Image (cartoon, rainbow, N blue to C red):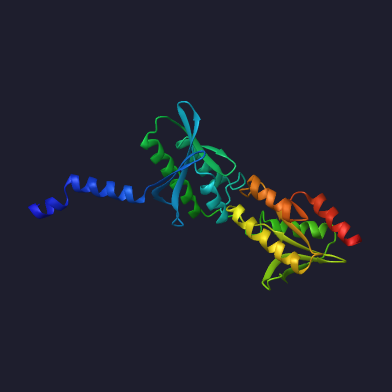
Amino acid sequence: MNTTINNLLSPDILRSSMEHFWNEQLTIEQTKNGLVAALPLMYPDGWQITVNIEPFAPAQALITDKGRTLMLLDREGLNLDSRAKHNYALLEEKKKVFELDQHGFELRKLIKLPLNGLDIQLFAESLVSISHLIYRNESRSAQEHTVRKSLERTFQTYHFAPKQDVYLTGKVGEKFHVDFLFEKERQLAMESIEIHDRVKDYMERWAWRWTDLKKQNPELLSAMVYNPDLQDWDSTSLKIGKEVCDLFCPSHDRDQIKDTLIRLKAA
């Protein structure tokens, strides 16, 4: 190797190059609960791996993905429940290898303090590894587990026949799509919530939409139905729903949906 090439491929240059890359790509922010770090690793969809690190005990911290990894797989239709035996077994094996705990969609692990960079790197790599299950072929049917399908079964059971996929106009003139519209003495517009993450942003948008629609039609009743088992709900998002909707409930609460529609029918 000649001198010029040797100068460009020295161990010191490689180390400096990698350190520069890490310093450029690593983002760390302090939060009220601890730290959040975006690392130079990526999910298959191109989003950067982000982890939260929170104090747990005097000599321990909890590192977690806040549900981002499994929600990505769920959003892409990958079936990871026990009925999809192959996918489920692969996930369980990876959790065991990386010593991860699962709570709902959230993957997490206890690590020692003071922080060791290796622990953080291995946790991030476990998320990358699990996210690549997206390429497995046991996908969940597009018709399975959706809130809208659950509502349609409820309507069929109790003989309700709403209009579907209706556009309503708000006070500012913008048209908003709603999944169902019941028309009696008063109208009831119903939206099925299908998203799995960023629920707070979604609910804030709908709070404005319902407010605008009711300014145009003060008699309009609003309803939103969700699935708490498959969606990342927080207390603020739930409060928004209860505040702005006349009916806001889980899709499995068929009695509440039925009773509301029966009262509307009798009005």
Q: Where is residue 266 in the image (x, y as percent from the top left)?
A: 91, 60
> Which quadrant is the C terminus positioned in?
bottom right
Q: Position of residue 105 (x, y in %)?
A: 57, 44
Residue ID at (51%, 48%): 69
User: In the image, is 155 to the left or to the right of 110?
Assistant: right
Most foreground residue, 250 or 54: 54
Residue ID at (17%, 50%): 9
Quarter-of-image position of residue 172? bottom right
Residue 182 seen in render: yes
Residue ID at (66%, 72%): 174
Most distant residue in the left direction:
3
Quarter-of-image position of residue 139? bottom right
Q: Position of residue 215 (x, y in %)?
A: 75, 66
Residue ID at (84%, 58%): 261
**Above or below, 44 relative to 16:** below
Most foreground residue, 27 or 17: 27
Most foreground residue, 113 or 97: 113
User: In the image, is 135 to the left or to the right of 191?
Assistant: left
Q: Where is residue 3 in the image (x, y as percent from the top left)?
A: 8, 52
User: In the image, is 198 to the left or to the right of 3?
Assistant: right
**Above or below, 105 relative to 176:** above
Most distant residue in the right direction:
266
